[in-house]
Image: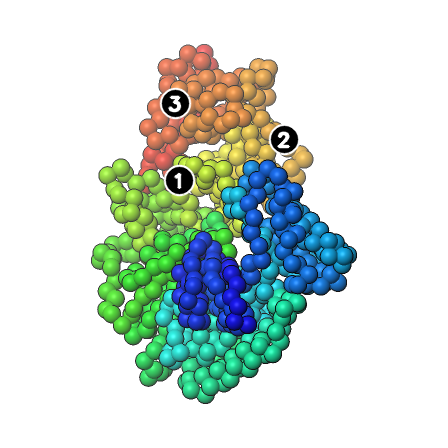
């Protein structure tokens, strides 16, 4: 037992310094910290102790051998076969090899694992013992091999299942925190055997609280585990192991008698609270726990005269596209609640990134970079015994007043007008540079690009203040607030396909209904400022042949069909938008098959058509500029509008009308060019601007274009 061997304790990235301290506290003197773990020398007693008591290690590996791996791989196999494998496990036992690392000779882990396996099998054959079998699912023995540059090292795994599987957590919530990370958070938060009260307002299945409680109550993390790799090791010493287990059980009982620890966990999911209680029961500490269903932004500090009080939590990260608003507002409310309710507490918060922590408006005194699985996260520590003045400039009430006034006025107008999608705010106050649109019970916030003289951090802060104020002032849930940021994507961003959330609602516009998507695209599927033009098209359409170019989701086509058009032809480059358009037709009890939906580049499609007066009304709403990869030509509406109108007019009946609109702010109609093409235009822009867009009369232009006769 006194002979020492070399070991390697693996851990998650970011936990190495803590593991180094822990191993020293367990009585080890020769410890070396390295990437993803620590090397140490120990006798069997201390090796067993690390297995049983390490809160941070993932595995404890006994080093069995090392060799250089050069061009002659046979030499490596021979070196592996020199290890006395028969002294570590029986030929009747099953084993598996896991392999990490690579070099010029071994480029695939599967090949490396095969090489090690061959060396083990060769050894047993050379001993005349036959061949042990491999079992990848439930092996008796696990062998780990690691290749670093030319050096290959192989180990026997003493733990079997990874050490984070403590044995008390049989079920878990949707986003579980690994027990080793939870223990690290508790240690960094300052949890000791003197801690008296622990609170977690986002407790889920209780992992963070329970790992912290195990530190307070001197509960060995491995005490509840039933299966260990070391028990299948041929050199296993059961009496020694049992002695350590008995000591651990005794320490837990003594600490339990000594400690007044209380745990308070809350979560908005009652189902996971039941799991938390079961986990606590398995750890024999359920009598210390109080689990409650509740909103973290309304959590109150428990009544207690205790000195050592710690709140620790792992709030949602909002890593999915579209969850930013809900998550950031959650952090904002949570920060306010902490300041008001937990003034004398120590607080530890694990967050997805820095921007989330900033929304707390609290000053941290320490931050640590950690990894939750593959996700890089930040642990921030706060001392709320110190005064926490909110570090933000005092904002005026102008924004709240403007939003409230706009909402009261425009909500009445929209109800009277018969629309459930409308603009609430459009950069009314220049420093809050965004548009806010209402879609039923949802808000869509579109941030405009900030002027070059405004620092990005200031623009960001103003945007979040706008979101805060919207949530405080208006009757919209944070989960129903959707942020659209109009900015160019750089680097990897433009290649990353975000998961579609498909948050949709059906809005009504006069007598039409439309499906809008609030989460997955820059635009929602409905351009609100063009609603007057769509209604006018519907009024013109009775008994007519209608063409809708750049049809998008065919909302104008729906108005035309509802207005009694004999046939509506919708042309757009996007298959997705045309399919959406067909959905809009069905939503209004219109049969898509009675109309035409054509996927094509509108310019090319117009050029291909023979001059033939087919349409009574053409709705033409092109983009300001388009260089789509699927378009043959670049479209610039200022430069190309006369040519576009000429092409469209070739398909227009003598007494027909083109409704031509665009959103170029400084658009100027080329009347001379139109006259040369025997076309005339009447400016309908002013009459087409609805009350909710009255502040920005230049938001679009609308012209009634027709043939010039005589």
Q: Nearer the viewer, mark 1 or mark 3?
A: 1
> Could you say which is closer to the camera, residue 118 or residue 298?
118
The N terminus - image quarter:
bottom right
**Earlier along the polypeptide chain: callout 3 or callout 2?**
2
Dividing the picture into quadrants, the one containing residue 258 is bottom left
Can residue 319 be spotted in the picture?
yes
Q: Residues within 10 Å of mark 1 (few under 14, many from 20)?
A: few
Q: Nearer the viewer, mark 1 or mark 2?
A: 1
Q: Nearer the viewer, mark 3 or mark 2?
A: 3
**Earlier along the polypeptide chain: callout 1 or callout 2?**
1
> Could you say which is closer to the camera, residue 590 or residue 520?
520
The C terminus - image quarter:
top left
Q: CA distance from mark 1 to mark 3?
A: 22 Å
Q: CA distance from mark 1 to mark 2?
A: 33 Å
Q: Position of residue 628 (x, y in %)?
A: 49, 27
Residue 486 numbered mark, or none: 1
Q: CA distance from mark 3 to mark 2?
A: 29 Å
Rendered residue at 31%/66% (across/down): 382
**Earlier along the polypeptide chain: callout 1 or callout 3?**
1
Residue that numbered label 2 is attached to: 596
Labels 3 & 2 near each other (Cβ < 8 A)? no
488 vs 114, left or right, is left
Where disc 2 sits, the SS reads strand
701 vs 656, left or right, is left
Where disc 1 sits, the SS reads loop
456 vs 295, left or right, is left
Q: Count every numbered label the image shows and give the total.
A: 3
Residue that numbered label 3 is attached to: 638
Q: Position of residue 245 (x, y in %)?
A: 56, 78
């Amino acid at each position: 037992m006194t002979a020492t061997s070399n070991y390697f304790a693996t851990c998650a990235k970011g936990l190495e310094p803590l593991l180094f301290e822990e191993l020293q506290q367990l009585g080890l003197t020769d410890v070396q910290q390295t990437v993803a773990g620590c090397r140490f020398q120990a006798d069997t007693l201390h090796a067993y102790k690390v297995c049983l008591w390490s809160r941070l290690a993932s595995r404890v590996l006994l080093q069995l051998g090392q060799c250089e791996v050069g061009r002659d791989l046979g030499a490596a196999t021979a070196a592996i076969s020199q290890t006395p494998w028969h002294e570590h496990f029986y030929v009747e036992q099953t084993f598996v090899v896991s392999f990490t690392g690579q070099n010029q000779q071994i480029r695939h882990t599967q090949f490396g694992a095969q090489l090690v396996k061959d060396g083990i099998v060769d050894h047993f054959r050379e001993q005349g013992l036959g061949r042990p079998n491999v079992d990848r699912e439930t092996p008796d023995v696990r062998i780990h091999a690691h290749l670093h540059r030319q050096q290959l090292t192989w180990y026997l795994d003493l733990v079997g299942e990874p050490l984070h599987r403590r044995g008390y957590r049989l079920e878990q919530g949707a986003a579980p925190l690994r027990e080793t990370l939870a223990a690290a958070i508790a240690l960094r938060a300052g949890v000791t055997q003197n801690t008296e009260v622990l609170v977690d307002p986002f407790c889920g299945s209780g992992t963070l609280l329970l790992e912290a409680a195990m530190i307070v109550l001197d509960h060995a993390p491995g005490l509840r585990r039933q299966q260990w790799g070391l028990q299948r090791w041929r050199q296993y010493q059961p009496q020694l192991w049992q002695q350590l287990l008995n000591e651990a059980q005794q320490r837990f009982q003594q600490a339990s008698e000594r400690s007044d620890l209380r745990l308070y966990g809350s979560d908005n999911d009652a189902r996971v609270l039941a799991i938390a209680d079961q986990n606590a029961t398995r750890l024999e500490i359920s009598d210390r726990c109080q689990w409650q269903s509740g909103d973290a932004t309304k959590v109150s500090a428990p009544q207690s005269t205790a000195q050592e009080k710690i709140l620790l939590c792992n709030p949602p990260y909002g890593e999915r596209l579209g969850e930013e608003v809900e998550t950031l507002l959650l952090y904002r409310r949570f920060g306010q609640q902490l300041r008001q309710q937990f003034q004398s507490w120590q607080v530890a918060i694990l967050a997805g990134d820095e921007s989330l922590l900033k929304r707390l408006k609290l000053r941290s005194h320490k931050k640590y970079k950690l990894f939750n699985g593959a996700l890089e996260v930040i642990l921030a520590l706060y001392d709320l015994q110190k005064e926490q003045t909110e570090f933000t400039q005092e904002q005026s009430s102008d924004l709240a007043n403007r939003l409230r006034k706009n909402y009261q006025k425009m909500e009445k107008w929209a109800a009277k007008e018969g629309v459930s999608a409308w603009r609430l705010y459009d950069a009314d106050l220049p420093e809050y540079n965004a548009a806010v649109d209402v879609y039923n019970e949802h808000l869509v916030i579109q941030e405009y690009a900030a002027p070059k003289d405004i620092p990005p951090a200031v623009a960001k802060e103003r945007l979040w203040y706008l979101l805060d104020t919207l949530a405080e002032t208006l009757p919209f849930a944070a989960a129903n607030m959707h942020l659209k940021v109009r900015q160019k994507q750089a680097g990897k961003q433009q290649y990353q396909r975000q998961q579609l959330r498909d948050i949709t609602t059906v809005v009504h516009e006069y007598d039409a209904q439309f499906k809008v998507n609030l989460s997955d695209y820059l635009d929602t599927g409905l351009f609100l400022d063009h609603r007057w033009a769509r209604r006018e098209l519907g009024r013109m359409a009775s008994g007519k042949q209608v063409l809708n170019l750049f049809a998008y989701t065919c909302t104008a086509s729906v108005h035309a069909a509802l207005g009694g058009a004999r046939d509506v032809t919708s042309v757009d480059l996007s298959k997705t938008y045309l399919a959406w358009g067909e959905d809009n037709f069905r939503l209004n009890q219109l049969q898509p098959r009675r109309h035409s939906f054509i996927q094509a580049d509108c310019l090319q499609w117009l050029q291909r058509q023979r001059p033939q007066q087919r349409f009574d009304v053409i709705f033409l709403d092109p983009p300001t500029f388009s260089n789509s990869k699927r378009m043959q030509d670049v479209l610039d509406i200022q430069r190309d509008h006369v040519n576009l109108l000429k092409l469209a007019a070739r398909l227009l009946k003598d007494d027909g009308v083109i409704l031509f609109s665009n959103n170029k702010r400084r658009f100027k109609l080329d009347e001379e060019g139109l006259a040369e093409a025997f076309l005339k235009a009447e400016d309908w822009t002013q009459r087409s601007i609805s009350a909710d867009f009255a502040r920005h009369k230049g938001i679009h232009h609308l012209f009634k274009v027709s043939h010039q006769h005589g």
